[in-house]
Image: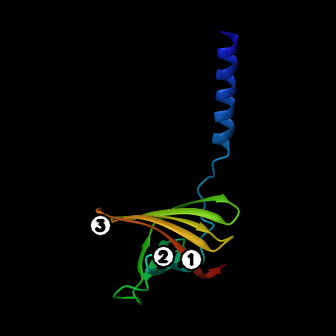
Amino acid sequence: MKSLITILIIFVFTAAIEASELSLPTQKLNGTNITYNYTSGRSYNVKFEEEGISYRYLTGSKPEKWWGPFPYKAFNVESNVYLASWFEKEYGDYVTLLINFNNNVLYGSAILSGKTVHFYGANIVKVNRK
């Protein structure tokens, strides 16, 4: 019985320590502009601002058109690595980006128009951070 109680206590404290290491939401991406190319051939330019995230689909039919801003959430998961996401209510798109400025790669996952899945890696080709 003592062994079981000891194991439970260790488990509870370990879970509490791990939970305390979770990052809080951040707005540190505001003022950041990123251009990246997915392995699928798609290219985007995104900018994070206080109003939200906006983007241009550079390989789409209207590369000069900015979409957004859309409210976004982000976590600073480790030094220069961010997890960001937003929902485009009007279009039914939900997008998540894992952005790694340490090695200039980005991973994107999206549900587009509520039916198409996007799941690709990308090379970041240009970054401007304020």
What label sits on residue 113 in the rendered view?
A: 3
What is the spatial separation of the Cα atoms under label 1 and label 3, in whole angstroms? 25 Å
Q: Which mark is residue 39?
A: 2
Look at mark 1 in the image and give the residue it sits on: 123
Q: Nearer the viewer, mark 2 or mark 3?
A: 2
Q: Are marks 1 and 3 in contact (CB under 8 Å)?
A: no
Along the polypeptide, which appears first: circle 1 or circle 2? 2
Mark 1 and mark 2: span between their CA atoms?
Answer: 8 Å
At x 66%, y 40%, the residue is: 18
- Secondary structure of the residue carrying tag 1 is strand
Work out whether 15 lies above or below 58: above
- Given this view, does label 1 or label 3 mark the residue nearer the observer? 1
User: Residue 62: where, in percent of width, then height?
Assistant: 36, 88
Instruction: Report x, y in % for residue 38.
Output: 48, 76
The answer to whether residue 126 is left or right of residue 117 is right
Query: What whole-number distance in Å separates the C-alpha atoms at marks 2 and 3?
Result: 21 Å
Mark nearer the N terminus (1 vs 3): 3
Q: Quadrant of residue 27?
A: bottom right
